[in-house]
Image: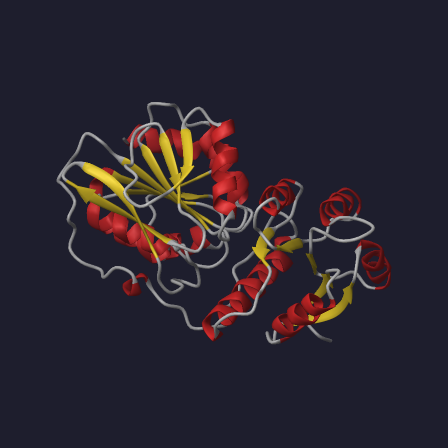
Amino acid sequence: MSNKIKILVVDDSSVVRQTLSDILSSDPDIEVMGTASDPYVAVERIGKQVPDVITLDVEMPRMDGITFLQKIMSQHPIPVVIISSLAGKGTETAWKAMEYGAVDVIPKPTLGTKQFIEESRIQICDAVKAASRARLKKVTPIEEVAPKLTADVILSKAGSSAMAETTDKVIVVGASTGGTDALRVFLEMVPVDSPGILIVQHMPEHFTHSFAERLNSLCAITVKEAETNDTVIRGRALIAPGNRHTLLKRSGARYYVEVRDGPLVSRHRPSVDVLFRSTARYAGKNAIGIIMTGMGDDGARGMKEMKEAGAYTIAQDEASCVVFGMPAEAIKLGGVDKVLPLKSILAEALRRV
């Protein structure tokens, strides 16, 4: 009996259906059980065999993907990964998909360099594997299927350049699957006089800008997509832009952001490991590190480096995680000082600063 993850691909484009089928079938742990050109055909397929995961386009004839997603989640929840062109007006639609229960939202693969195609394959297959284990609320880490680069390719590990102590502290946060909602809960509680916050949430290019704007409308503090040379200041959270690594830097007592290109690190760009390593170097004991829900181990090594540099580190507990992968790996490496439920993390962080 096959233990492969069974996928139903729903997209109105025959070219996209074939491309996604080829990408997914390249992974030995995944089986494309069928495709559908629209939600009505998908319902017929599901009636014959329930998939482990559905990949779903947004713009389709007869019924759009968001409406179909709502019906799935209200009638017979199945993990859904939205695969959409996240540009222009589509970005807000994709964000709505996350609100309505999609496990992840990732961009459609397009023609490009061999490296770009391989990165798209890794991203899509990883998202589907995470979704298959989610049971919509809980996921276990998966075995990695491709070599991973470490933060060394962006910033070498070196002795701390942090000041012994500064009046301004900085909070850095890493999250992945399930992180969009976790960050909303976290940031909505942050008071306007809190230390500056810098966040890496695994998210596609273009999507982070909309995500930051939405959080800015909900929170007492200011939330914006990070840009190079942005100062990390009290009452503001900066979110790493999709597809760019984001580093914390220091000039005198001023903390600021550097956004740069580079290869995938721990299978991601932006990478939590890159942010955490730069924080260990430039902030040291003046930082609080928080690792939240997410698949895989991005951030685990960086968090350990932060702790070794004197930072105080917190991991979200298993019960409140959608995916207890990243926090579990950080705990396993010995990089975590405290494990807490999501709603208790902010109070502990503020107590420490």
For the N terminus, the image quarter is bottom right
Residue 144 can be seen in this image: no
Q: Position of residue 290 (x, y in %)?
A: 37, 43
* Residue at left offset 51%, top offset 28%: 217
Q: Is residue 32 visible?
A: yes
Question: What quarter of the picture does the C terminus occupy?
Answer: top left
- Residue 200 vs residue 178: left or right? left
The number of callouts visible is 0
**Residue at 33% in and 23% down:** 193
- Which residue occupies 50% across, 56% down? 295
Rendered image quadrant of residue 85:
bottom right
Q: Please name whichever residue, 308 or 70, is drawn nearer the observer in this view of the structure.
A: 70
Q: Residue furthest front?
A: 88
Quarter location, residue 251:
top left
Residue 309 at x, y = what percent?
A: 21, 49
Q: Is residue 146 above or below residue 335?
A: below
Question: Observer-nearest residue: 249 or 111?
Answer: 111
Q: Position of residue 237 (x, y in %)?
A: 38, 35
Is 197 left or right of 293, judged from the image as shown? left
Percent position (x, y) of residue 300?
Answer: 37, 55
